[in-house]
Image (tube, rainbow, N blue to C red):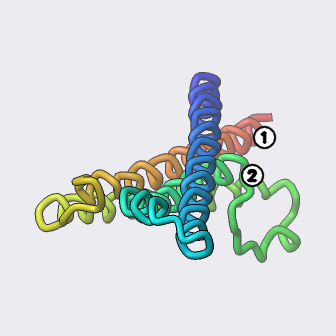
Amino acid sequence: MKILTRIDTAIARFEGWLVILFLTLMVSLTFIQVLLRNLFIYAHAGWANDLMGRFDWAEPFVRLLVLWVSFLGASLVTGENKHIKIDLLTHLIPVSWLPLREGLLSLAGTVVSALMIRASLFYIRTEMTFGGNLFLGLPTWIAQGILPVGFSLICFRFLLRGVDSALTVFRRATR
């Protein structure tokens, strides 16, 4: 289990750096677009409009980065057990049953994530067959690769939590 925890920590660190990089790119590209647009509109700088035409890929790229940041963030919060939960039983069941409940919820999250991995892989295969290009000649299926990757990371995090909960339940049962 310690090796899985180390792998999880390394992945989380890498995800955190990617989120920082992607957010920086999003803010920078959006700022440049706004600056160039305002220079053209208010300062009547024709060169700004010409330069804006060369940055026509920036807006779809920023939208793509939003998708990547969303999935990486979802994976990070799942790893920290701070994801959105519908939890009615926590206050009703005894405290000693909470690891069992956590294990069952993690199992459910793992199953749903695995189903989403399968669906996203089907979607990617369809995009490879029929899809077009997103920007700068980049095929849409490459850009949407975050779908199976993101769901795989989330599934891994749920699986880790489930194994940890199962070990906790097992240790308590053998006492």
Disc 1 residue crowd, few under 14, some 14–19, many 20+, Cα 10 Å: few
Circle 1: residue type: Arg
Q: Residue at x 50, y 46 (%)?
A: 153
Residue nearer the viewer, 94 or 87: 87
- For the C terminus, the image quarter is top right
Q: Residue furthest left?
A: 129
Q: Quadrant of residue 166?
A: top right
**Would you name the residue on which mark 1 appears?**
172
Residue nearer the viewer, 148 or 118: 148
Residue 158 shows up from this direction: no
**Would you name the residue on which mark 2 appears?**
99
Contact, mark 2 vs mark 1 (Cβ under 8 Å)? yes
Residue 122 shows up from this direction: yes
Q: Secondary structure at mark 1?
A: helix
Task: Judge left or right: residue 139 versus residue 22.
Answer: left
Q: Secondary structure at mark 2?
A: helix
- How many numbered discs, if any? 2
